[in-house]
Image (cartoon, grey):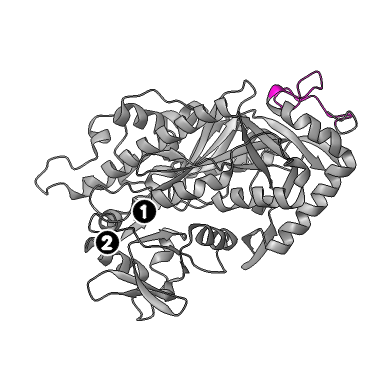
C-alpha cells in the first residue's frame, strides 16, 4: 500500500478498508499493490478520467427543483468498494428471504379483496392471525384495491426488488429499506464497472483479483422478467421496457437496461391494443406483440399517459392482464409493502409466511400511527430519525441529533398533529470507506443497494450498487442530493 496515499487518513472505527492501525483490512488487501502503483497522482488522474468518461456517456440522474427538471451527474469515486464473497453470500440470502416474504404479503394483501362477499372477515391472513393491525393494510396510502386485477393468478407481484443495506460498526448488515414498486439503480451498477474499466485499466490488470462481473446479472434479470409472462405464453416471452421517456429521472438507466437485455424501449405512445386483447408495441417502425412489460415509471403515472388511440395506459394494461395475455413487472400496488411503516413489520412477515428467522437485521422502528408507539418516543425525537410514510407527502428524513431547538419544536408539533404520517427510527452508526474528496482520501459513509428477482427462483443479482455520502459526517447518499457511487467488487 502506498504510504502517501493514506497519509493522514483518519482512523474511523467503522471503516471497511483501513483498520485503526492505519493498515488495509484483509478484504481490501488485494487492492494494495494496485493502489501502491497508482499513488495519489494516479488516483487523482483516475478521478478526472472517470468524470470525463461519464460525461461522455451521459451517466446522470434527474431531479426537480422549482418546477424544473435538472440533470445531476452521478460521480464515481475512483477507489472501489470491496465486499468479501462470504459476506455477500449471507447478504444475498437475507435479501432473497425478504423478497419471498414481501411477495407473500402482497399476495395476501390483494387476495383479501377477492374473498367471497359472505365471508365474515375479508382481511388478509396475516391480519386475521393478529400479526399485523388491520389498518396497516386497509388504510395504508399505498394500498390500491384496483391493482388486484393487474396480476395474473399466482404471479409474484414484485418480479424485481431492491433492498438498501447498511453495514454497522460491528460488521452486521442491516436492511433499512425495501423497494418493490419501480426499483432503480441496477443500470448504474453496470455502468460503474464499465466506467472503471475504461477510465482506470490499472485496477484491472491481467492476473489481478478475480471479482464477480456485475454483467452476470443481466441473464438473471432477463429470466426474472420472463417468469412474469402469463401462463398462456408459448415460447420465449417477448419483453419490452416501458418508460416515461427523457423526463424520467433514470432515463439513462432505462436505455442501458433495454440495450443490455436486447429488448425495445418504448413509451406510452408506442403501446397499442391488439384485437385478441393483448398489447403490441411500436419499435423500429414495426409493431409486434409483447408478453411482458418491464414497467419503469410510477403507479400514479399509468393513468396519466395515453396510448395513440387515447386510451389510458392503465386501462389497456389491466385489460390485457385480465385477458391472460400480459404480465407486468412490477405489478402496480406494491407501495403497501415497501413504505416506512410496512418496513417495521417485515420480520413478522418473514416469521408468519416463511416460518423462518430473519437473516438480516432491521433498524428499531416505531410506527407513530400506533398511539402506544408514539407515546414511547414522544420525548426522544431529538435522538431519532423521523421518516414520512410514503403516500402522505411531507418532508424527507429528519435527523433529530442535527436539529436545532426550534427545528425540534416544529418537528414535534408536526408529528403530534398527524402521527400516522411518520415513523421514528434509531440512528445507525454505519460504515465508511476511503473516498477521494478535494484531492485526498477521507472516510465517507457508504450504503449498498442489492437487487433480486423473484423467478423462476429467487435470486440476488451480483450487481449491487454502492452509494457514498460526499459531505463530511453526512448520512445522505442519494445522487440528487449530492451523493456519489463506487464500483462494488465481490471478491473471494
With 454 as the anchor, is 201 left or right in this view? right
- The residue at 43%/48% (across/down) is 160
User: In this figure, what is the number of numbered marks?
Assistant: 2
Whether residue 379 is visible here, answered yes or no, is no
List x then y, in percent, for residue 419: 46, 40
Numbered range of the magenta stretch: 6-26
List x then y, in percent, for residue 52: 78, 58
- Which label's residue is closer to the chain start, 2 or 1? 1
Q: Is residue 24 magenta?
A: yes
Mark 1 — residue? 226
Main SS type for the magenta part?
loop
Query: Which quarter of the rendering shows the C terminus?
Result: top right
Q: Looking at the image, which is closer to me, 187 or 213?
A: 213
Within 10 Å of disc 2 (Cα), the crowding (few <14, some 14-19, many 20+) is many
List x then y, in percent, for residue 9: 84, 29
Relative to residue 179, is residue 303 depicted above or below? below
Q: Residue 321 has which mark?
A: 2
With 1 as the anchor, is 258 left or right in this view? left
Q: CA distance from mark 2 to mark 1?
A: 15 Å
Q: Looking at the image, which is closer to me, 265 or 140?
A: 265
Amino acid at each position: 500500500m502506498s504510504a502517501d496515499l493514506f497519509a493522514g487518513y483518519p482512523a474511523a472505527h467503522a471503516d471497511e478498508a483501513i483498520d485503526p492501525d492505519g493498515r488495509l483490512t484483509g478484504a481490501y488487501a488485494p487492492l494494495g499493490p494496485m493502489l501502491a502503483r497508482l499513488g495519489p497522482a494516479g488516483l487523482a488522474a483516475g478521478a478526472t478520467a472517470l468524470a470525463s468518461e461519464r460525461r461522455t456517456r451521459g451517466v446522470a440522474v434527474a431531479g426537480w427543483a422549482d418546477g424544473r427538471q435538472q440533470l445531476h451527474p452521478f460521480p464515481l469515486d475512483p477507489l472501489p468498494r470491496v465486499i468479501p464473497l462470504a459476506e455477500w453470500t449471507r447478504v444475498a440470502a437475507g435479501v432473497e428471504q425478504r423478497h419471498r416474504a414481501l411477495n407473500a404479503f402482497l399476495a395476501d394483501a390483494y387476495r383479501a379483496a377477492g374473498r367471497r362477499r359472505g365471508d365474515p372477515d375479508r382481511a388478509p391472513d396475516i391480519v386475521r392471525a393478529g400479526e399485523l393491525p388491520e389498518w396497516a393494510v386497509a388504510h395504508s396510502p399505498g394500498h390500491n384495491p384496483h391493482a388486484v386485477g393487474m396480476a395474473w393468478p399466482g404471479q409474484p407481484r414484485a418480479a424485481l426488488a431492491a433492498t438498501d443495506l447498511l453495514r454497522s460498526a460491528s460488521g452486521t448488515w442491516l436492511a433499512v429499506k425495501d423497494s418493490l414498486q419501480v426499483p432503480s439503480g441496477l443500470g448504474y451498477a453496470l455502468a460503474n464497472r464499465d466506467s472503471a474499466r475504461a477510465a482506470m485499466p490499472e485496477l484491472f490488470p491481467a492476473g489481478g483479483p478475480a471479482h464477480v462481473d456485475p454483467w452476470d446479472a443481466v441473464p438473471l434479470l432477463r429470466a426474472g422478467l420472463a417468469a412474469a409472462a402469463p401462463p398462456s405464453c408459448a415460447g420465449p416471452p417477448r419483453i419490452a421496457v416501458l418508460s416515461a421517456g427523457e423526463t424520467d429521472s433514470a432515463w439513462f438507466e432505462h436505455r442501458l437496461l433495454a440495450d443490455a437485455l436486447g429488448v425495445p424501449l418504448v413509451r406510452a405512445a408506442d403501446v397499442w391494443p391488439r384485437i385478441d386483447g393483448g398489447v403490441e408495441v411500436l419499435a423500429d417502425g414495426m409493431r409486434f406483440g409483447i408478453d411482458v412489460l418491464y414497467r419503469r415509471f410510477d403507479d400514479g403515472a399509468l393513468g396519466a399517459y395515453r396510448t395513440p388511440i387515447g386510451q389510458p395506459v392503465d386501462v389497456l394494461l389491466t385489460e390485457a392482464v385480465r385477458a391472460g395475455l400480459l404480465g407486468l413487472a412490477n405489478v402496480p400496488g406494491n407501495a403497501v409493502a415497501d413504505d416506512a411503516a410496512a418496513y417495521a413489520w417485515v420480520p413478522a412477515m418473514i416469521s408468519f409466511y416463511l416460518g423462518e428467522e430473519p437473516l438480516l437485521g432491521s433498524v428499531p422502528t416505531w410506527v407513530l400511527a400506533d398511539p402506544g408507539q408514539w407515546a414511547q418516543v414522544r420525548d426522544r425525537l431529538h435522538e431519532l430519525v423521523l421518516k414520512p410514510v410514503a403516500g402522505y407527502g411531507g418532508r424527507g428524513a429528519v435527523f433529530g441529533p442535527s436539529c436545532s431547538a426550534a427545528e425540534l419544536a416544529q418537528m414535534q408539533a408536526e408529528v403530534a398533529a398527524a402521527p400516522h404520517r411518520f415513523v421514528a427510527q434509531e440512528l445507525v452508526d454505519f460504515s465508511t470507506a476511503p473516498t477521494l474528496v478535494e484531492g485526498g482520501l477521507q472516510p465517507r459513509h457508504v450504503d449498498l443497494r442489492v437487487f433480486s428477482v423473484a423467478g423462476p427462483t429467487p435470486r440476488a443479482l451480483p450487481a449491487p450498487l454502492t452509494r457514498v455520502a460526499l459531505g463530511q459526517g453526512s448520512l445522505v447518499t442519494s445522487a440528487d442530493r449530492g451523493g456519489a457511487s463506487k464500483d462494488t467488487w465481490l471478491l473471494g
